[in-house]
Image: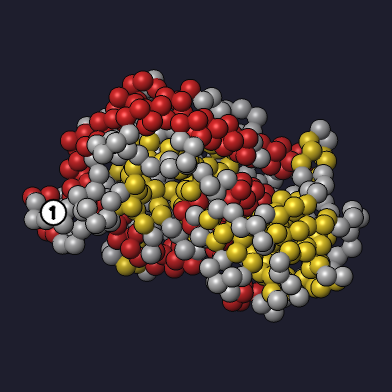
């Protein structure tokens, strides 16, 4: 990856702005590489929920909206640009009421989606359509098994349908449905939130199910094994993690293993149900929501400490496969569809969480933001033939160089942004070296009122300049909508050499990614 990633706005350079606060001194220690920032921490999530699938991905083969085999061409192009590593499907809570046979073949079974609004699901988008979508965007499949209302046998059959490379009855069924070659299922979730919507199980009840599913369900193609991900916690309580990791430690062997433990944590401020508005909010709401999202770091530390007790070699990844801002539904929308707007605040929130995952890259090797299109903190919003890219989408695109790059430590005094009774760091930063040797630096200015000047020095590397993109907005609640799709878009930024350091001026409430050049 080179600076050509930023060609969209290459001609625009931000002017130098006066700052009231002193510059922050930052050092990038290129001589002390850390863990690989796995590309899968940039994973996506698409549940059979609201307009996430239908109208978001799937419009049908006969739609006037340009499509390939029923899948929107504009959405595919946008997702290919951010190099989506994997897409988790069909849920979420929906997964534990999903029966895969309803969604294959020429005759589909229509069901009521009891998980999300009791609307009718035609099952027009099923396994083969999902795999087609995965192929079109150049991604990998992460399927969630139905543990809550399904059976081990049903899950075995689904995996055989998808992955068998021998002429079994289910492989022949797949071929008759248009795909003779087996699919690759890279990852398999053994249930979803089994402590709540996935079955209201106790830890002991879940580990009993886990032993059966992890033993009997997997890929039927020995050349392409499937990574198995167990249900993990949804709070900072460690009881569930203790039970699952203890089972892994005691029972692990040739016939039982899993490679990941999930963690679900949404940014929900001031109690349930989520009621913070996604637009028209003030600086109080901005500061409170960001303070809430920074709790992701201590949460990971607490759960990872339990995992370390049973797995000091970190063989089991912590998979944060549901995260993001959960805000009040868009006024006038079906509240069960979880549709919300996406602001500059959400862009800052996304960067903060990605940075937290990167700092924990030795244990956090996969994450899936919720959700990809039209639901919660989405990458993309659609309305009929119209499509708009959100500020969060632009952050994911700016971070593409960090996929599979090597984490590099940075040291700095973050300073403080204080608003009322809320204190946050002014700066949040990470660095990494990509496979071509280029050093990338991400800088997030949390202060919505003041620009921030950073003096960045690199040990073991003589940088003469820095160039890349910065994402800022007229206000923290600025959004991209169908009438104004480019209100929040990245602009080019260049740093200058001064006294051996790179000088960068970051706009208020902004996310900046630059490469350091010799």
Residue 153 percent coordinates (x, y): 17, 35
Q: As displayed, is residue 457 above or below residue 422?
A: below
Q: Which residue is mark 1?
A: 171
Please name whichever residue, 159 or 132, is drawn nearer the observer in this view of the structure. 159
- Which of the 4 image quadrants contains residue 154? top left
Residue 317 shown left or right of residue 209 in the figure: right
Please state, as top left, top right, bottom left or bottom right, where the C terminus lies in the image.
bottom right
Identify the residue shown where x is 86% and y is 65%: 17
Q: In the rendered view, how is the structure colored?
A: secondary structure
Please name whichever residue, 245 or 122, is drawn nearer the observer in this view of the structure. 245
Residue 57 shown left or right of residue 170 in the figure: right
Q: As displayed, is residue 165 above or below residue 270?
A: below
Q: Residues within 10 Å of mark 1 (few under 14, many from 20)?
A: many
Residue 501 percent coordinates (x, y): 81, 67
- Which of the 4 image quadrants contains residue 488? bottom right
Residue 440 shown left or right of residue 283 in the figure: left
Can residue 4 be seen here? yes
Please state, as top left, top right, bottom left or bottom right, where the N terminus lies in the image.
bottom right
């Amino acid at each position: 990856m080179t600076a050509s990633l930023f060609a969209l706005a290459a001609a625009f350079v931000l002017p130098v702005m006066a700052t009231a606060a002193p510059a922050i001194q930052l050092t990038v220690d290129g001589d002390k590489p850390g863990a690989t920032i796995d590309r899968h921490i940039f994973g996506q999530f698409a549940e059979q929920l609201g307009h996430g699938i239908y109208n978001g991905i799937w419009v049908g083969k006969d739609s006037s909206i340009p499509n390939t085999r029923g899948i929107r061409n504009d959405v595919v192009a946008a997702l290919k640009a951010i190099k989506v590593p994997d897409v988790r499907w069909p849920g979420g809570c929906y997964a534990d009421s999903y029966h895969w046979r309803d969604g294959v073949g020429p005759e589909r079974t229509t069901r009521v989606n009891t998980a999300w609004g009791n609307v009718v699901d035609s099952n027009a988008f099923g396994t083969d359509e999902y795999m087609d979508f995965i192929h079109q965007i150049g991604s990998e499949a992460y399927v969630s098994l139905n543990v809550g209302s399904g059976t081990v046998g049903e899950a075995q059959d689904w995996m055989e349908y998808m992955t068998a490379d021998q002429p079994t009855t289910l492989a022949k069924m797949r071929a008759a449905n248009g795909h003779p070659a087996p699919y690759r299922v890279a990852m398999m979730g053994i249930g979803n939130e089994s402590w709540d919507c996935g079955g209201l199980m106790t830890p002991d009840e879940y580990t009993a199910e886990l032993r059966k599913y992890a033993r009997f369900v997997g890929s039927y193609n020995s050349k392409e094994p499937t990574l198995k991900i167990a249900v993990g916690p949804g709070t900072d309580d460690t009881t569930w993690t203790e039970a699952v990791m203890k089972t892994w430690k005691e029972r692990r062997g040739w016939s039982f293993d899993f490679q990941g433990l999930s963690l679900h944590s949404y940014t929900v401020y001031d109690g349930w149900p989520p009621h913070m508005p996604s637009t028209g909010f003030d600086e109080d709401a901005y500061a409170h929501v960001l303070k809430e999202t920074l709790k992701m770091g201590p949460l990971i530390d607490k759960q990872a400490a339990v995992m370390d007790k049973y797995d000091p070699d970190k063989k089991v990844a912590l998979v944060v496969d549901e995260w993001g801002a959960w805000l009040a539904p868009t006024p006038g929308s079906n509240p069960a569809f979880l549709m919300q707007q996406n602001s500059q605040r959400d862009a800052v929130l996304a960067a903060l969480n990605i940075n937290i995952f990167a700092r924990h890259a030795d244990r956090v090797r996969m994450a899936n933001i919720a959700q990809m299109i039209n639901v919660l903190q989405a990458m993309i919003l659609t309305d009929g033939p119209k499509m708009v890219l959100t500020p969060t989408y632009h952050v994911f695109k700016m971070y593409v160089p960090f996929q599979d790059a090597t984490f590099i430590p940075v040291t700095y005094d973050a300073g403080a942004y204080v608003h009322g009774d809320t204190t946050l760091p002014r700066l949040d930063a990470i660095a990494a070296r990509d496979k071509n040797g280029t050093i990338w630096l991400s800088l997030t200015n949390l202060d919505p009122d003041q620009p921030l000047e950073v003096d960045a020095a690199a040990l073991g590397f003589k940088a003469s300049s820095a160039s890349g993109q910065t994402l800022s907005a007229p206000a923290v609640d600025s959004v991209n909508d169908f009438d104004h799709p480019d209100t929040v878009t990245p602009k080019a930024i260049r740093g200058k050499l001064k006294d051996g350091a790179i000088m960068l001026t970051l706009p208020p409430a902004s996310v900046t990614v630059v490469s350091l050049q010799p």
